[in-house]
Image: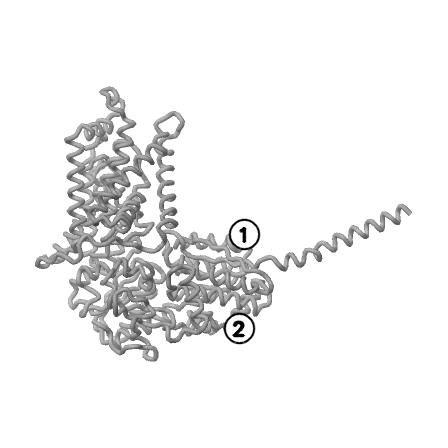
Amino acid sequence: MSYFLLLAVNGLVVGLIYALVASGLTLVFSVLKVVNFGHGSLYMLGGYASYYLISGLGLPPLLGVVGAMVTLFVFGVVFERLVIAPMYTDKVERKDEYAIIVTFGLTILITNLALVVFGPFAKSPPSFMTGALIAGPLILPYDRLIAAVAAVVLLVGLSLFLKRTALGQALDAVSQSRESAAVIGIDPKRMYTVAFGLGSALAGGAGALIAPVFALSPSMGDLPAVQAFIIIVLGGMGSVGGSVAGGVLLGLVQALGVGYLPDPNRALAYTQAFGALLLVITLLVRPTGLFGRPHLRLE
Amino acid sequence: MEHSIRNHLGALALFALAAVPLASAPALAEDPIQLGWVGPLSPPGNYSGGQEMQWAVQLGVDEINKAGGLLGRQLEVTYEDTKGQPAEGSAAAVRLITKNNVSAIFGEFHSSVALAEIEEAHKYGVAWMGTDVWADDITAKQYPEVFRVSPANSLVYVKAADWTVEQGFKNIAIIAENTDFGQGGAKIIADELQAKNVAHTLATIDLNQQDFTPALLRLMNQSPRPDAIQMVVAGQAQYQLVKQACQLGLAPTAETKLIGSSGLLQKEVWEVDGACAKNLLIVNVAQPKSQWNDKAKAFVAAFTERYKRAPTGVALEAYDTLGVVAEAIRKAGSADRAAIVRALEEIKYEGANATYSFPTTKEPAWAFHQFMDVPFTIIQYTEENQGPEEAAIVYPKNWATTDKILP
């Protein structure tokens, strides 16, 4: 039982971080109808932003996370205005292809720039708190615990923002129908900018939270980006709640799969396969994902 | 008369045409000798290792050119980023051979990529010299063009496994990456432990993975818990393993030792793993500092001066790989591809890390063109922020600075 608990808690913690990354991706998708293939590089930039804010300005680690989110929000807004915005005009004919190309381009550009600017060698910001929580059979490093708690706070905050604020409801309205939203006086273009900025900030926050747990490298965003795509399909595209459920479920399935697969040699190597299997089964049973609806809306 | 003048003019034109190659001969002789380097410089390859290798090679190229070049010609190296991907390695080798017209190819960090590159080198008859690629299969194919400076898995991991047995470890976990290097190395260790009746467990990891905690929890939950964990993992993925094993209280501890490889020699291990890196054991393919020759001392000083960081054993191997190829060109007296291949078989070259030669023995298969006297030590960090050259040497006995490993 204690072994199960150890695996489950670890899976839950990692799943919450996945959920945070995925919620940013789903926010951008539901409002802009753009699949941001550059989401992983924003996660990576968030990690480096917190590193330099902590080491350069001497900010405490948790303030470094906040600083990274603000930095990435600004980056997202600027990127959306300069690169994504032309998609809303007649200048761009094949809008879907344009979005794919520019967000893919973002990944390639930022990863390669990161190699030059940050260097090829790993970096790590200081721990949020050294040591581990040991309670009976449970061992949980404080860095993971704090990252998970911060992820929960951010996800709850996002949910409240979307439901309880005028701006959040405006984002929801645009996600349902940009034409109808425009009729009631909401500027869809402004909402696109806000959504992309928020999505970038969430990715950056996740990268900053995970930086002391793992380490920083220019390619650190590759795997979380893949996980995020699995999660948003699993949870139902456009559903923030679905992203949370999908992230936690994916984390749990991967941890327990590795822990209990009869062949210990291959167990860890199959981590991604457990995620893929979960996705296939879910889509067979519920083609719109766990919380998705045939008609896309931000929830 | 007119006819005669025309004849004379014709003859002059012929002489002029014939003289063109003669006149341009000195210019051709001054064309740089072209060599091709392959290795990972961007994801998903181990670009930190690749970067160190590239820096070491460029340092060597600059030294050779400053000293007058090779055979009176400057040396020019084209660097190909193979990204840790076999398809990229294969395409890079073809580009170097057909477009850059290189005389030889050298480098590479990933065995799986090397295995793709050597197929092209063999097809075109171009010498290929591996820098830090350990899979036995690379030289076991016994291609005449393929040579290796770095150890084969069999050369190091049999001895490393024997050492763990000598230390009295009774239950050893092997964590290996899912590549030719990792799986090959793990099999060699497992076979050796099996032959000596030592219990062992295998765990394969995906290098793209960042969270190894579930697998480490599995090892922790194993009964009896492993008393040593041998990582057959290249590069920075080990940082995560060390950190996560340490945070769980699994290793390195008095009960469970943790043994890694060259990626842990970079100073960043202290930034990422902090105190967790203390007491780590590391297989290090390099001479201990006490054995450094003048070339090694000069290289370490020059590398540190230029790049503001100390080189690891991988950089020494990269520097020596260039040195070996350059020496073969000198010995061959030309940059002709076939002549270089022949010269490499006869070479004896004193580099910074060792004195290199490449036997043609065919048993065991991997020994063909494999440099056999690879210097390797097992070191242990005994203090935080220690450099590998200051770490305690626990193997081999003749270089050991201590006879016991720290808990």
Q: Which residue is mark 2?
A: B346
- Give residue B247's position: percent from left, percent from top: 19, 59
Q: Is residue B223 above or below residue A168?
A: below
- Residue drawn at x 26%, y 73% is B164
* Quarter occupied by residue B114: bottom left
- Give residue A159's position: percent from left, percent from top: 16, 36
Q: Is residue B131 above or below residue B80?
A: below
Q: Amino acid at mark 2?
A: Glu
| Callouts 2 and 1 close, C-beta under 8 Å | no
Q: Is residue B46 above or below residue B188?
A: above
Q: Return the residue nearer the eye: A203 or B296.
A: B296
Q: Residue furthest bottom?
A: B398
Q: Amino acid at mark 1?
A: Lys
Q: Residues within 10 Å of mark 1 (few under 14, many from 20)?
A: few
* Quarter occupied by residue A65: top left
- Residue drawn at x 15%, y 31% is A163
Q: Which mark is residue B99?
A: 1
Q: Are marks 2 and 1 on the same chain?
A: yes
Q: How many marks?
A: 2
Q: Secondary structure at mark 2?
A: helix
Chain letter of disc 2?
Answer: B
Q: Return the residue nearer the eye: B276 or B122.
A: B276
Q: Is residue A276 visible?
A: no
Q: CA distance from mark 2 to mark 1?
A: 29 Å
Q: Residues within 10 Å of mark 2 (few under 14, many from 20)?
A: some
Q: Return the residue nearer the eye: A144 or B175.
A: A144
- Give residue B290's position: percent from left, percent from top: 37, 75
Chain letter of disc 1?
Answer: B
Q: Secondary structure at mark 1?
A: loop
Q: Residue furthest front?
A: A57
